[in-house]
Image (cartoon, helix red, strand yellow):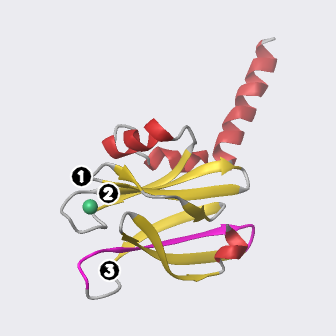
Amino acid sequence: MRKVIFIFFIGFIFYTYSSQEIFQEDIDQKNPLLKIFQDEYSNRVILTKEGDITDDGIGDLIIIYEVSKSEKRMVVVLGGSERLTSSVKAPVERQSIKLKNIDEKAQMEFIVSGYKGSKLGYAIYRIEDNRIIDLFGEGMDECC
Ligand SMILES: [Ca+2]
């Protein structure tokens, strides 16, 4: 019996490290903006990125979450107003979020990239009127 438990345990460790769960270590579970998300969504959070993207001096939180194995979506929790934007689709695997100011305006843009298998896609977004606006994208239909 002990041997069976041991094999199960090894299998579990292997499964944990081979799946995307490993990225969850980067998520601050105590972040109050994450709590706002969790009040509305029960989905598993895959990746978060915090920063003041709306340039109002209050931190915001970009969240990529899982709908299913083949469907991921992204939403932004706006600090201060504590509102959630509507969601947009996100890459299925190996997601990354980078904040970057790509124009002269103080507001930040954010670049989301990721894969579906070997297909890479990325898009640049900005928040306007509490909505995620898609400014530019390449291959997002392939990876989302
Ligand atoms: Ca903000």
Quadrant of the rendered image containing residue 90? bottom right
Instruction: Please name the amino acid that badge 3 sits on.
Output: Asn
Label 3 vs 1, first from the N-terminus: 1
Kindly identify the residue that appears in the image at 32 percent across and 80 percent down.
101
Q: Is mark 1 within 8 Å of ligand 1?
A: yes
How far is mark 3 from mark 1, CA to CA? 21 Å
- Label 2 element class: strand
Position in image of residue 103 (x %, y %):
32, 87
28 above or below 70?
above
Position in image of residue 10 (x %, y %):
72, 32
Q: Does 111 appear in magenta?
A: yes
Label 1 packing within 10 angstroms: few (<14), some (14-19), many (20+) = few
Q: Which residue is mark 3?
A: 101
Which segment is the magenta one? 105-118
- Label 3 element class: loop
Position in image of residue 75 (x %, y %):
48, 57
Position in image of residue 26 (x %, y %):
44, 49
Label 2 vs 3, first from the N-terminus: 2
- Point out which mark residue 80 bears: 1
Kindly identify the residue that appears in the image at 56 percent across and 47 percent down.
22
Instruction: Please name the amino acid that badge 1 sits on.
Output: Gly
Q: Which residue is mark 2?
A: 60
